[in-house]
């Protein structure tokens, strides 16, 4: 992910990657070629844009009219944590300590209040199925004019949200209670990941104690996941990322467990098949043969995911990517299905699905609709297959575009983190690319 604030001497501190107009044209041509090959829609139809513009009018009057029909959480301490260059803020959290439990709220932008099945925006979102992220170029699922305004949980503004409230046992970290409802929130502050780390370092700062409590819970949930056999391919993730990742995983799990066990309904569940024993052996053998990498003996016979976790935690940093590639090479592709059976192998969850990113994933948008309306689309199986296919297409387009950047002498990571600036001087462009 993009770093928050650039540090002196870092890639981000160097400013944008500069390229010539000719190279800019080649990149644009390559994008258009990929969009055509994978049927990725870039520009939004005028009808969709007009609808989105209309839904951003009279925002405060509409929210005021909704308050009596929702849980009013505007006095609850709430905040967002995102990369420094984030354009929209679609999730926020709140937390309190209770006797023998934690109470965690995850608030998600209420996209389906604005984007409903009778709108052109919904039809367009279904067609796109997800946001596609190319280095320094994003193809959105929803019109940015909507996603970056009324669906963005900006600080000090009332916003409509879909809240997942969870009471979590302090010992077992299991759910004592789950409540999912429409709400009105008012975020106290927008934090970057670096700012979150600062609050964790100094709890006397605003939101310092709240972030410390959030990390206390998130760290326990993270360690429990690993102990249970959840695959953790990035063992060095910082505390701010841990808070957000674990909070979102817990909320997604709460929602899909509620849909399956409490309601018994179909939804867009996320199913991840497991590799065969031979495939796992192939991956572990490749990892074991890497220079400086060793899988502890007690991990071999237990669970391959735990063996990978152990190798990642003890291996030299230079081998991290090679270990990750060895695992991903044998992993089947996760897909959306209308029932959860088979579970999510990498996470080691028996039931899992997406709920926390309705701005960028169709699955989350559909699940928001099902949760609130208790209305399962008739073509749900078709939607699952379509979303799975479009995700694969988007990821393939991203891989091919990164490969093209490298062929043009550009570093995809630098382009993604620093952005691109077109300059007329070829020598200057060659020097900084």
Image (tube, grey):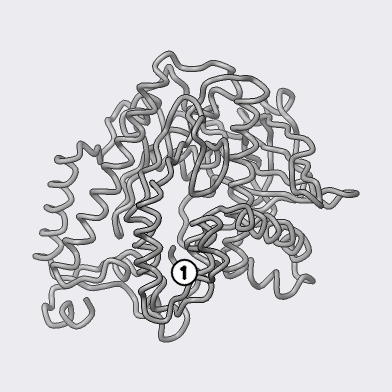
> Does residue 407 sit above or below 393 in this rendering?
below
Decide if residue 274 is on the left or right side of residue 420.
right
Which residue is depicted at the point 54% across and 45% down?
Answer: 90
> Does residue 30 sit above or below 168 in this rendering?
below
Work out which quarter of the rendered image holds the N terminus and state it: bottom left
Say which element carries label 1.
Answer: loop
Q: Which residue lies furthest to the right in this view?
A: 99
Decide if residue 103 is on the left or right side of residue 222.
right
Q: Give the quarter of the image for residue 51.
A: top left
Q: Mark 1 points at which residue?
A: 3
Q: Give the quarter of the image for residue 220.
A: bottom right
Which residue is depicted at the point 32% across and 68% down?
Answer: 413
Q: Position of residue 357 (x, y in %)?
A: 50, 42
Q: Quick one: 369 or 190, which is closer to the camera? A: 369
Which residue is depicted at the point 64% across and 20% down?
Answer: 263
Which residue is depicted at the point 39% across and 58% down?
Answer: 281
Q: Position of residue 121 (x, y in %)?
A: 38, 27
> Does residue 111 sit above or below 197 in this rendering?
above
Q: Which residue lies furthest to the bottom in this view?
A: 9
Pointer 1 local density, CA inside 10 Å: few below 14, some 14–19, many at least 20: some
Q: Where is residue 419 in the image (x, y as percent from the top left)?
A: 31, 66
Work out which quarter of the rendered image holds the C terminus and state it: bottom left
Q: Which residue lies furthest to the top in this view?
A: 378
Q: Quick one: 385 or 292, which is closer to the camera? A: 292
Q: Quick one: 173 or 9, which is closer to the camera? A: 173
Q: Where is residue 417 in the image (x, y as percent from the top left)?
A: 37, 67
Decide if residue 308 is on the left or right side of residue 38.
right
Q: Give the quarter of the image for residue 400.
A: bottom left
């Amino acid at each position: 992910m993009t770093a928050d604030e650039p540090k002196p001497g870092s890639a981000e501190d160097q400013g944008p990657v500069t390229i010539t107009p000719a190279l800019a044209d080649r990149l644009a041509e390559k994008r258009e070629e990929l969009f055509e090959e994978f049927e990725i829609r870039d520009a939004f139809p005028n009808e969709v844009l007009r609808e989105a513009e209309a839904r951003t009018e009279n925002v405060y009057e509409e929210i005021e009219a909704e308050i009596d029909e929702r849980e009013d959480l505007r006095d609850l301490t709430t905040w967002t944590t995102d990369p420094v260059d984030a354009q929209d803020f679609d999730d926020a959290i709140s937390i309190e300590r209770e006797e023998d439990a934690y109470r965690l709220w995850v608030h998600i932008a209420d996209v389906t209040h604005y984007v409903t099945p009778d709108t052109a925006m919904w039809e367009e979102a279904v067609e796109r199925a997800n946001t596609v992220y190319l280095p320094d170029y994003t193809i959105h699922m929803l019109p940015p004019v909507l996603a970056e305004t009324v669906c963005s949980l900006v600080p000090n503004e009332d916003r409509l949200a879909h809240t997942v409230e969870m009471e979590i046992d302090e010992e077992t970290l299991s759910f004592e209670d789950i409540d999912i409802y429409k709400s009105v929130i008012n975020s106290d502050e927008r934090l970057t990941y670096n700012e979150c780390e600062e609050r964790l370092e100094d709890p006397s700062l605003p939101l310092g104690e709240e972030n410390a409590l959030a990390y206390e819970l998130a760290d326990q949930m993270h360690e429990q996941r690993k102990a249970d056999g959840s695959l953790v391919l990035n063992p060095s993730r910082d505390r701010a990322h841990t808070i957000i990742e674990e909070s979102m995983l817990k909320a997604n799990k709460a929602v899909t467990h509620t849909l399956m066990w409490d309601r018994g309904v179909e939804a867009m569940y996320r199913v991840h098949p497991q590799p065969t024993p031979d495939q796992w052996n192939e991956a572990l053998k490749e990892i074991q043969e890497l220079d400086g990498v060793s899988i502890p003996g007690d991990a071999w016979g237990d669970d391959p995911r735990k063996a990978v976790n152990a190798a990642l935690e003890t291996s030299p940093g230079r081998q991290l990517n090679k270990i990750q590639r060895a695992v991903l090479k044998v992993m089947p592709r996760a897909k959306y299905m209308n029932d959860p059976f088979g579970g999510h192998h990498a996470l080691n969850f028996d039931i899992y699905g997406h709920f926390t990113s309705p701005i960028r994933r169709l699955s989350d948008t559909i699940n928001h609709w099902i949760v609130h309306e208790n209305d399962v689309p008739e073509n749900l199986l078709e939607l699952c297959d379509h979303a799975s296919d479009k995700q694969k297409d988007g990821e393939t387009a991203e891989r091919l575009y990164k490969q093209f950047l490298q062929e043009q002498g550009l570093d995809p990571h630098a382009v993604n983190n620093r952005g691109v600036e077109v300059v007329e001087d070829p020598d200057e462009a060659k020097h900084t690319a």
